[in-house]
Image (tube, helix red, strand yellow):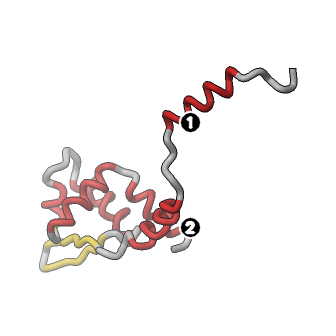
């Protein structure tokens, strides 16, 4: 996955409303009006969030009669997931141990004095 494509996906995932929409779509396809129901925002605002998700390839939208439906694209996060898994080869940083190390280093006499 290119850096530009990753940027678009991570931008889309960076908003809590869009992440909530994706969680909702895990259950089933939904009409745009149903997606909007739980949120305290206008249908136009939800439509903008859906557009960002669609541009990132995370969802698709199709018109069925007069209703626009949203569908989660199951493979859309594959590239981002592969990219993130590349960091799994390293041990997670123990921040407490790192802080203790820095404090200990702070108390050592400076070699240049």
**Residue 99 x/y as whole percent:** 55, 31
**Residue 68 x/y as whole percent:** 19, 72
- The structure residue drawn at horizontal position 46% and vertical position 65%, both measured from the top left corner, is 85
- The structure residue drawn at horizontal position 62% and vertical position 30%, both measured from the top left corner, is 102
Q: Which mark is residue 3?
A: 2
Report the residue marked by disc 1. 98
Q: Which numbered disc, 1 or 2, marks the residue closer to the eye?
A: 1
Q: Disc 1, disc 2: CB below 8 Å?
A: no
Under circle 1, the secondary element is helix
**Vertically, is 11 above or below 103?**
below
Q: Residues within 10 Å of mark 1 (few under 14, many from 20)?
A: few
Give the mark nearer the N terminus: 1 vs 2: 2
- The structure residue drawn at horizontal position 20% and vertical position 65%, both measured from the top left corner, is 25
Q: In the figure, is residue 31 to the left or right of 103? A: left
Residue 56: quarter of image:
bottom left
Figure label count: 2
- In this view, the residue in front, 81 or 8, is 81
Q: Residues within 10 Å of mark 2 (few under 14, many from 20)?
A: few
**Vertically, is 77 above or below 94?**
below
Q: In the figure, is residue 58 to the left or right of 24? A: right
- The structure residue drawn at horizontal position 19% and vertical position 60%, both measured from the top left corner, is 24
Q: In the figure, is residue 50 to the left or right of 98? A: left
**Residue 50 x/y as whole percent:** 30, 63
Q: CA distance from mark 1 to mark 2?
A: 31 Å
């Amino acid at each position: 996955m290119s850096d530009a494509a990753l940027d678009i996906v991570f931008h889309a995932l960076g908003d809590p409303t869009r992440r909530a929409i994706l969680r909702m779509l895990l259950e089933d396809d939904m009409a745009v009006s149903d997606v909007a129901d739980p949120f305290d925002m206008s249908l136009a605002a939800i439509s903008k969030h859906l557009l960002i998700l669609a541009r990132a390839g995370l969802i698709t939208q199709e018109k069925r009669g007069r209703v626009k439906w949203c569908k989660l694209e199951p493979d859309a996060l594959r590239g981002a997931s592969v990219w993130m898994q590349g960091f799994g080869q390293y041990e997670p940083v123990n921040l407490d141990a790192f802080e203790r190390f820095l404090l200990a280093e702070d108390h050592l006499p400076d070699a240049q004095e």
